[in-house]
Amino acid sequence: MAANTKKFEENFKKLEALSEQLRSNEVTIDELVPRMKEALASIKVCKEVLAKTESQLEEISAEFEEIEEEDS
């Protein structure tokens, strides 16, 4: 498993768990701010991984287009 995929999955799971805890009122007021800061850090990691993945996919797509143009 690629490091970025692992980073994304770990952070996404943290966000899912926190979301569930918030929905079921399992987070106390004292835990709320630290947990939200943790969530923010996880969101940043996920966004970075997604942006990098998008960039890589755009590069791959451009290479496919070049190959198609060469074959025409």
Image (tube, rainbow, N blue to C red):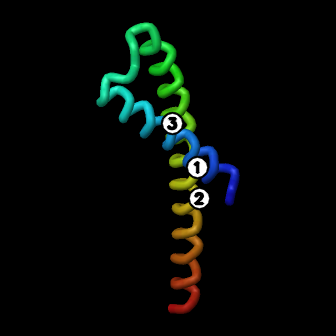
Residue 48 location, quadrant: top right
Secondary structure beneath label 2? helix
In the image, residue 19 above or below residue 50: above
Q: Which residue is mark 1?
A: 52
Vertical placement of residue 46 versus 31, above or below: below
Question: What residue is drawn where x is 59% and y is 73%?
Answer: 63
Callout in the foreground (1, 3): 3
Q: Secondary structure at mark 3?
A: helix
- Residue kind at label 3, given as amino acid type: Lys
Q: For mark 1, does the 10 Å Cα neighbourhood hold few (<14), some (14 to 19), or many (20 or more) residues?
A: few
Q: Say which amino acid is labelled 1.
A: Lys
Q: Position of residue 7 (x, y in %)?
A: 62, 44
Residue wearing tag 3: 14
Mark 1 → mark 3, Cα distance in angstroms: 20 Å
Q: How many marks?
A: 3
- Return the residue at label 2: 56
Q: Closer to the N terminus: mark 1 or mark 3?
A: 3
| Residue type, label 2 | Gln
Residue sitting nearer the eye, 2 or 24: 24
Residue 4: image location, x then y, percent? 64, 50
- Residue 33, position in %: x, y? 45, 13
Q: Are marks 1 and 2 in contact (CB under 8 Å)?
A: yes
How busy is the neighbourhood of tag 2: few (under 14 within 10 Å), some, or many (20 plus)?
few
Q: Looking at this view, is 1 or 65 the one in front? A: 1
Q: What residue is rendered at 34% in x and 26% in y?
A: 22
Residue 22 relative to residue 36: left or right: left
The image position of residue 5, as x and y in percent, is 61, 53
Tell me the distance, in whole angstroms, between the alpha carbons under discs 1 and 2: 6 Å
Query: Marks 3 and 2, Cα distance to the nearest angstrom?
Result: 25 Å
